[in-house]
């Protein structure tokens, strides 16, 4: 099985922006960009402007993860900035889910839906068949370095079973503490896309090439798969 890796760019060294992106272009599968508004989560990180600048040097798809209170205020800007995936928290789109999903699809972009740890899969049962990527948060959203919530393993298994039984096409992705301690259990549960941040990639070595090689070595050792990137 082919697994996918999506570096979380809020964890990168922005003083080495071009250097790190040029390296990751040859290794990663997509880029994960957290857009936070300081309201939905008590943090402010990257922005549509960051995506515009990233688009100038990135050769991989960009996934914009909207941790914002009003995603409808951001979607147009994210589309214009050039993100290929736009991932919305299910908890923020109750009234406008179908309208926003179709807005994204009509623009030629792919739709991601993100579930907080306390949000069950059943919450999105009415539109899960429409989505391209399902992100399961394994930490409460908003800050890096939080502890892995082990109860989410069952949710990943449920997402995999639901996908297989119904022929859904979404990628299963995990956001939160994807690292040496969790690679094995996440892969065994059915995860397909690993969002790798500080503990999973960027803190492994100051040199991004070396960090990537170390991450891959750890992943292969822990999962017993030969993954080459």
Image (cartoon, rainbow, N blue to C red):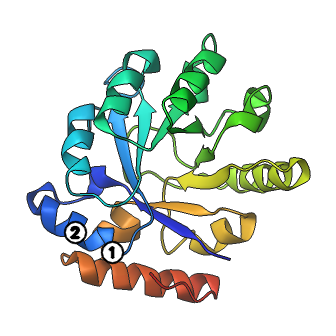
Q: Name the secondary structure under disc 2.
A: helix
Quadrant housing the N terminus: bottom right
Residue 72, by quadrant, is top left
On the rendered structure, is 124 left or right of 27?
right
Q: Position of residue 127 (x, y in %)?
A: 74, 28
Instruction: Judge whether residue 203 can be spotted in this image.
Output: no
Please tell me which residue is depicted at 59% across the width and 71% down the height of the picture. Answer: 3
- How packed mark 1 is, by other alpha carbons closer than 10 Å (few <14, some 14-19, many 20 or more), is few
Side of 57 relative to 97 (left or right)? left
Residue shown at 26% from the left, 38% from the top: 46
* Front-most of residues 197 and 151: 197
Along the line of sight, the residue nearer the viewer: 36 or 96? 96
Residue 27 x %, y %: 37, 75
Q: Which label belongs to residue 22? A: 2
Residue 103 pos. (x, y %)? 53, 22
In depth, the one of 152 and 5 nearer the eye is 5
Find residue 97 and report its image quarter.
top right
Q: Are marks 1 and 2 in contact (CB under 8 Å)?
A: yes
Question: For this view, does 228 lie left or right of residue 159?
Answer: left
Q: Residue at x 80, y 32 (%)?
A: 122
Residue visible at 65% across and 19% down?
98
Residue under numbered circle 1: 26
Above or below residue 221? Residue 199 is above
């Amino acid at each position: 099985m082919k697994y996918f890796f999506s570096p979380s760019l809020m964890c990168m060294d922005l003083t080495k922006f071009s250097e790190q992106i040029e390296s990751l272009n040859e290794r990663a599968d997509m880029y994960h960009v957290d857009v936070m508004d300081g309201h939905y989560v008590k943090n402010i990180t990257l922005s549509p402007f960051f995506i515009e600048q990233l688009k100038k040097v990135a050769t991989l798809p960009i996934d914009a993860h909207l941790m914002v209170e009003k995603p409808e205020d951001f979607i147009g800007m994210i589309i214009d900035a050039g993100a290929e995936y736009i991932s919305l928290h299910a908890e923020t789109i109750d009234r406008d889910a179908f309208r926003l999903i179709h807005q994204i699809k009509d623009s030629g972009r792919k739709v991601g839906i993100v579930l907080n740890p306390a949000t069950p899969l059943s919450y999105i049962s009415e539109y899960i068949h429409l989505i391209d990527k399902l992100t399961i948060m394994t930490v409460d959203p908003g800050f890096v370095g939080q502890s892995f919530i082990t109860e989410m393993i069952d949710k990943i298994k449920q997402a995999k079973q639901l996908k297989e039984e119904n022929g859904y096409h979404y990628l299963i992705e995990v956001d939160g503490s994807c690292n040496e301690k969790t690679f094995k259990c996440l892969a065994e549960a059915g995860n397909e896309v690993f969002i790798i941040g500080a503990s999973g990639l960027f803190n492994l070595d100051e040199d991004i090439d070396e960090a990537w090689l170390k991450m891959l070595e750890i992943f292969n050792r822990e999962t017993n798969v030969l993954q080459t990137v």
